[in-house]
Amino acid sequence: MLQPLHHTPPDDSPTEGSRSASPEPLTRAPRHPERPGPARDRLMLPPPALQGAIEALIFRDTRGLPLTDAQRLSHFPASPLVCLSWYQGMDAGLIRGPGRPRWRPFGCQVTLSGSQSQPVTSWAPTTGRGGMVCLTSDAARALFGIDPAVALDRFLPASSALGAEWQPLCQALARAPDDAATVAALLQHLAPRWQALQGRASPAPSLGQLGRHWVDRLALQAHDWARTHSTRQVERRIKAYSGRSLREWRALVQTEGAFVAARARHEAGLPPAWAELAQDTGFADQAHLVRAARRITGFAPGEFAQRFEHDESFWIYRLWV
């Protein structure tokens, strides 16, 4: 039986430290050079025992780096995925709000966030180590016994959102000293539940298709429902099941496809050719692509491309795309 997410204050409620001087969310800062040793930003596929449950693991370690305030910004796109995130050595939070955006710390080491309909910007006053476990809504529902729709466009303290059963996992993520220990904690706490639910591991998607497979499965589910339900009933069931319409989910992955195509052209030494990319990736025209890119990332394609290449805060896009 699904358990309701425990009550947490609204996202716009003030918290201690919310008046800290954070940079403006659109402030630009150059990429910091990579240091010797392991990459500071890593994208990993899940271990075999958790394939089909976890879409991706993301790690970022900026400890010891002399990052400026603006370099400690992180820009994230709108996304259909549910994320369990942890923060070590830093008081992370979001910069948001009407008028002049304000930074509000999460006030916890581990958060649960639902799918995001708009891009978000996070910041921390110090460097540190953190990571994200990315799941589809149905995997989060099955694993944790929660209704992911309650977390749409929200960041909730995982300790209260998931309940007492998952406190050991939250504590293990907050204390894991490195990536290997984090993966070990996920295997210990999630693999037995997932194997019991699935019976066997599902094939993992390729990096360019993360998130896309789940939307395809949702479309197939809608097709099955259409055999016994009207179009309006199917639309209501999809929104109740996933929190958004199938059209919204498809728009997200279509825009992601345009980003992947643009990255491929860049790596081949070719100009972006946005009008051609728009046609190739299913948009009506270049203006349609521009509107979609602004809705998902907050930036027009040209500015996004510049920030993708040069800005430190766009590290998540460089991993994802």
Image (cartoon, rainbow, N blue to C red):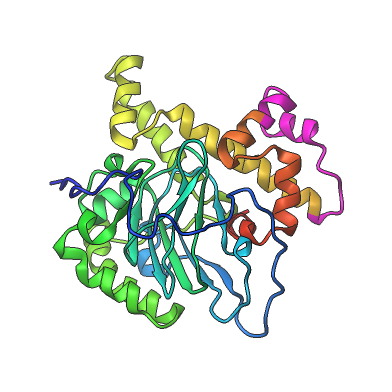
Q: Residue at x 21, y 65 (%)?
A: 166
Q: In the figure, is residue 73 to the left or right of 110?
A: right
Q: Residue at x 69, y 70 (%)?
A: 32
Whether residue 86 is situated above or below residue 9 in the rendered picture: below
Query: Does 278 lie within the magenta span?
Result: yes
Whether residue 153 is situated above or below residue 314 in the rendered picture: above
Q: Is 161 or 228 nearer to us in this picture?
A: 161
Query: Does 80 lie within the magenta span?
Result: no
Q: In the figure, is residue 261 to the left or right of 88?
A: right
Q: Is 173 or 92 nearer to us in this picture?
A: 92
Q: Residue at x 56, y 69 (%)?
A: 42
Q: In the figure, is residue 63 to the left or right of 232?
A: right
Give residue 237's quadrant in the image: top left
Give residue 236's quadrant in the image: top left
Q: Is 240 or 175 nearer to us in this picture?
A: 175
Q: Position of residue 124 (x, y in %)?
A: 49, 64
Q: Position of residue 261 (x, y in %)?
A: 71, 45
Q: Residue at x 53, y 57 (%)?
A: 22
Q: In the figure, is residue 45 to the left or right of 237?
A: right
Whether residue 203 is situated above or below residue 177 in the rendered picture: above
Give residue 254's quadrant in the image: top right
Q: Position of residue 138 (x, y in %)?
A: 32, 46
Q: Position of residue 55 (x, y in %)?
A: 44, 57
Query: Magenta residues, as a range?
Result: 267-290
Instruction: Count numbered badges in the picture.
Output: 0
